[in-house]
């Protein structure tokens, strides 16, 4: 369910890093797009929660903050697809942290603190961007490889490992922060004051008057034992998470416990650390879910092994084929039975063969995507007549001009 | 630091923080920018593993320092300590209330502070009581009343962009159209100090007191009645009509 990257940061597929970029990107966009920054500046109570950081507010031109937000959203889109990750990731983290600083001048709760956590996560993913292969940068880097080595990669098995330190350090950071909040409860609570039978029931009881909401929380008041168990559970989870992360024992249990803890906080205290749910999601085993969605049909793919552009185009599909259901054949090694088929012309396009069915060019790409149910919506939309017609035309144009405009070495090889 | 008892370490760092406080206007921006310059260097020299390793090591050393040793964390670092202090039999809270023409009070929905967004009202209340002068406090009160008027007109409306909005950090103390039906126009702001004295097991209210620590009626109009008598209520409506006498008092219990 979840992956302990501190225990072992290697995975057999690079999918989790790409998924993490998507998760953090969605979170940044959803969280920041609502902020009305000019109102943050144009109030008589500006910087009441953080006067020390008033320097971060462009008071003369508050519209700059709005521009900054839209720039951030644009950068996040590039970050999600993995384009120029080092530059984009650094800029995204900086802008997010700056907007977080402005936000913290009015809000000093975890709501603004999470913006800095997000910035750190972006920075770690950026710092180790060279390990992130299922990205635009990953495909761009294949330009530095020889055609022969790329063909060898396409034909290699699935027993590969991809390191993910970009997720290892955010996990360690979160574990340390949870440990610190658990430790502060012990230290400031004078030992076990936090789990004393009167503590949580009283907290909930008084808050029920101060922060009116619903009566469900009063269960904790009527049954103080729940409060004691909740307190013990909180300490065990907050302190134990770091131990689990470092030792590798009970990690999933602790992370599930943190999810439950986050939801129970919302239910009992009315404080929703929704950001934490996104941060926990970064460590979900997306690759396992992706593997479950994979179809098990075997495909044979025949490609032009002399064309670097063609080979590079297939590189992401090799990375996505984590079950090894696609066999990549250079034209020279293609099974003879395929070449003799009617309407099959290897010099014209790439082909995918599914037993008796042959798919050419654009349709071949569509069949590659069909290998996983995750892409079913995309496959469906690619099959719509206008999209399909445009796709065919585009493929034919690229195939006809790959030597001149798409860095293909076909002519030289010939 | 060698030979210093561990328990003294935060105190020593606390002293250093106090010494540096006068220079915070230079130090805080420098820390913030310095952090990102260091990150840029580490990212730029990613091929040299020692540079990247040094940045990661320094990051975690700083994270540990600001969460376990130093009593404050300069941004972009932050420290976590949710509900670390255990509760005591006497608990004190403050809150903003809005007052209508009839003298009825409603707890302020903090989302009105930046229109469907919120600020830390605790910090605002502290600043109004201890830092700001009368003129600024009155300007803030006038602004809050204006915001309340705008916000009130939109409460209950759920346009699409509000429905897909990022979930609020705080889910309590929200105004509803039904709640607001009972109120005339808001003409004033009050800040209350509420004291709850609870039983030893924390499940009964032994005594409750509340006192107005600040009030402002910027337009000069005064409410019809005096502030209601002090009784606790679990309703946002901090004033309900006493059915037996017709006088307004606070609500009782839940």
Image: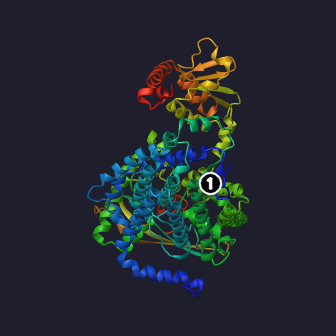
Name the residue: 45% across, 64% down.
Answer: B76
Image coords of residue A289 (percent x, y): 67, 41
Q: Camera-side residue: A309 or B10?
A: A309
Q: Could you say which quadrant of the image residue B19 lies in?
A: bottom left
Q: Percent x, y for residue A284?
A: 64, 49
Q: Is residue A270 left or right of residue A223?
A: left
Rendered position, B62 above or below A23? below
Color theme of the render: rainbow
Residue that lies at the very extreme toward the bottom in this rendered image: B3
State the residue in front, B53 or B192.
Answer: B53
**Pointer 1 local density, CA inside 10 Å: few below 14, some 14–19, many at least 20:** some
Q: Mark 1 sits on what residue? A: A263
Residue sitting at 56 percent across and 85 percent down?
A: B8
Of residues B216 and A47, the one nearer the viewer is A47
- Of residues B165 and B180, the one drawn nearer to the viewer in this rendering: B165
Is A318 above or below relative to A255? above
Secondary structure, mark 1, is helix
State which quadrant residue A350 falls in. Answer: top right
- The outermost residue toward the top is A342
* Residue A393 position in % (x across, y down): 46, 20
How many numbered marks appear?
1
Does residue B226 appear in this view?
Answer: no
Q: Quadrant of residue B37?
A: bottom left
Q: Chain of mark 1?
A: A
Horizontally, is B41 left or right of A38 in the view? right
Residue A30: give x, y in percent of width and height: 48, 47
Q: Is residue A154 visible?
A: yes
């Amino acid at each position: 369910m979840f992956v302990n990257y501190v225990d072992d940061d290697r995975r057999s597929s690079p999918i989790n890093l790409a998924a993490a970029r998507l998760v953090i990107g969605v979170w940044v966009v959803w969280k920041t797009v609502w902020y009305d920054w000019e109102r943050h500046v144009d109030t008589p109570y500006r910087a009441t929660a953080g006067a020390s950081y008033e320097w971060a507010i462009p008071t003369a031109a508050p519209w700059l903050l709005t521009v900054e937000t839209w720039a951030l959203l644009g950068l996040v889109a590039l970050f999600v697809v993995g384009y120029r990750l080092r530059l984009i990731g650094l800029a995204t983290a900086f802008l997010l942290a700056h907007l977080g600083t402005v936000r913290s001048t009015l809000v000093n709760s975890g709501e603004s603190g999470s913006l800095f956590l997000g910035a750190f996560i972006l920075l770690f993913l950026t710092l180790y961007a060279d390990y992130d292969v299922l990205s635009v940068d990953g495909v761009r880097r294949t330009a530095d490889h020889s055609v022969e080595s790329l063909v060898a990669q396409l034909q290699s098995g699935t027993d590969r490992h991809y390191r993910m330190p970009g997720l290892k350090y955010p996990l360690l950071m979160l574990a340390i922060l949870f440990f610190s909040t658990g430790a502060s409860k012990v230290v400031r609570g004078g030992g076990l004051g936090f789990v004393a039978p009167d503590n949580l029931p009283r907290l909930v009881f008084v808050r029920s008057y101060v922060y009116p909401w619903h009566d469900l929380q009063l269960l904790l008041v009527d049954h103080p034992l729940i409060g004691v168990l909740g307190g013990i559970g909180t300490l065990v989870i907050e302190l134990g998470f770091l131990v689990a992360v470092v030792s590798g024992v009970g990690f999933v249990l602790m992370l599930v416990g943190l999810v439950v803890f986050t939801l129970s906080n919302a239910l009992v205290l009315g404080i929703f650390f929704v950001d934490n749910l996104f941060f926990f999601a970064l460590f979900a085993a997306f690759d396992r879910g992706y593997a479950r969605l994979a179809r098990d049909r075997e495909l044979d793919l025949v490609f032009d092994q002399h064309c670097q552009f063609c080979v590079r185009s297939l590189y992401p599909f090799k990375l996505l084929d984590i079950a090894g259901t696609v066999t990549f054949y250079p034209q020279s090694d293609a099974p003879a039975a395929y070449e003799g088929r009617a309407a099959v012309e290897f010099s014209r396009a790439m082909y995918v063969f599914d037993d008796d069915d042959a798919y050419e060019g654009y349709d071949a790409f569509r069949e590659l995507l069909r290998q996983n149910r995750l892409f079913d919506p995309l496959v469906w939309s690619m099959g719509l007549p206008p999209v399909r017609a445009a796709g065919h035309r585009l493929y034919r144009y690229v195939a006809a001009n790959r030597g001149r405009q798409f860095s293909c070495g076909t002519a030289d090889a010939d | 630091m060698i030979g210093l008892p561990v328990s003294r370490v935060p105190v020593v760092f606390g002293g250093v923080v106090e010494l540096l406080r006068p220079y915070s206007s230079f130090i805080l921006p420098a820390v913030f920018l310095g952090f990102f310059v260091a990150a840029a260097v580490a990212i730029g020299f990613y091929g040299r593993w020692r540079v990247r390793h040094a940045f990661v090591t320094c990051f975690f050393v700083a994270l540990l320092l600001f969460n376990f040793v130093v009593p404050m964390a300069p941004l972009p670092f932050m420290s976590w300590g949710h509900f670390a202090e255990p509760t005591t039999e006497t608990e004190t809270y403050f809150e903003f209330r809005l007052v209508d023409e009839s003298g009825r009070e409603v707890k302020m929905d903090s989302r009105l502070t930046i229109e469907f967004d919120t600020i830390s009202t605790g910090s605002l209340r502290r600043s109004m009581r201890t830092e700001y002068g009368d003129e600024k406090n009155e300007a803030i009160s006038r602004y809050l009343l204006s915001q309340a008027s705008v916000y009130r007109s939109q409460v209950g409306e759920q346009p699409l962009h509000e429905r897909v909005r990022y979930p609020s950090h705080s889910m309590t103390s929200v105004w509803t159209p039904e709640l607001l039906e009972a109120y005339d126009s808001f003409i004033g702001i009050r800040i209350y100090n509420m004291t709850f004295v609870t039983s030893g097991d924390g499940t009964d209210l032994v005594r409750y007191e509340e006192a107005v620590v600040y009030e402002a009626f910027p337009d000069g109009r005064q409410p019809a009645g005096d502030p209601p008598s002090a009784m606790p209520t679990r309703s946002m409506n901090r004033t309900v009509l006493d059915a037996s006498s017709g006088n307004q008092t606070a609500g009782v219990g839940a």
